Image (cartoon, helix red, strand yellow):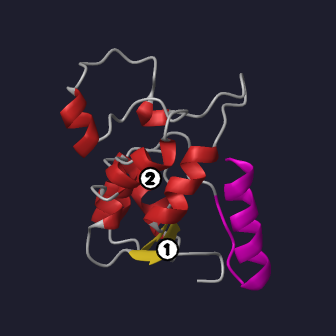
Amino acid sequence: HSYQVWTLMRFIGKRSQLQFVDAPELWDFGVAADVNRALEHRAALFIPETPFKNLFNDLYAIGLPAFVPSIAWLAKLWSQLKNTADDDAYDGWFGRRLPRLRLSVADVAVAPEPIDMEVDGERKARHWLRLSDYHNFPGVHVFESGAD
């Protein structure tokens, strides 16, 4: 986790009776034991590092209530995250080293390329987050801050 995510979790934990458990590195929701482990919890605090995450869809499908940071909060977080190895911006799904097809200048003005968070990362994140499942599915609880 980034220090921003740890700070949020500590803030919520100190001001409530909530306890946090990290999601396992490997899971298979085709395995009953993994589903049962997930269902032992009352809800999921889902802090994604990319706009499209299969884990969210898995948690949603099994009916686990999800709490997700707002688009503004995540866009700010993503634009500030750094790789621990080289202190570059963390690109995640926006990987600048991934091969890609270049969009025309006109297309980029409408939809920014989801590449390289070092350049205008917050704007890119805001654009692509508005399309994410976890900001569009019914029943997902969006929060603006730790106090929410």
Residue at the far right: name it. 14
Does any portion of residue 32 appear in the rendered image?
Answer: no
Question: Which residue position is annotated with label 2?
Answer: 34
Question: Can you say whether 19 is above or below 117 in the image?
Answer: below
Is residue 78 in sight in this rendering?
A: yes
- Horizontally, residue 99 falls left or right of residue 8, namely left
Work out whether residue 84 or residue 114 is closer to the camera in this orientation and state it.
114
Residue 75 sits inside the magenta stretch: no
Mark 1 / mark 2, whichever is N-terminal: 2
Task: Please report the residue visible at 34 percent of the width from the left and 47 percent of the height from the top.
Answer: 52
Is 73 located above or below residue 18 in the figure? above
Q: What amino acid type is highlighted by mark number 1?
A: Ala
Residue 1 percent location from the top left of the image? 67, 47
Q: Nearer the viewer, residue 41 or 125?
A: 125
Residue at the spot 28% in from the left edge and 63% down from the top edge? 61
Front in this rendered view, residue 49 or 40: 49
- Between 27 and 9, the one nearer to me in the picture: 9
Query: What secondary structure prevails in the magenta region?
Result: helix
Q: Specify the amino acid type for callout 2.
A: Asp
How dense is the environment of label 2, judged by Cα within 10 Å: few (below 14), some, or many (20 and up)?
some
Q: How many other residues sit within 10 Å of disc 1, few (<14), some (14-19) or many (≥20)? A: some
Tell me the magenta residue range: 1-21
Q: Are marks 1 and 2 in contact (CB under 8 Å)?
A: no
Q: Which residue is mark 1?
A: 43
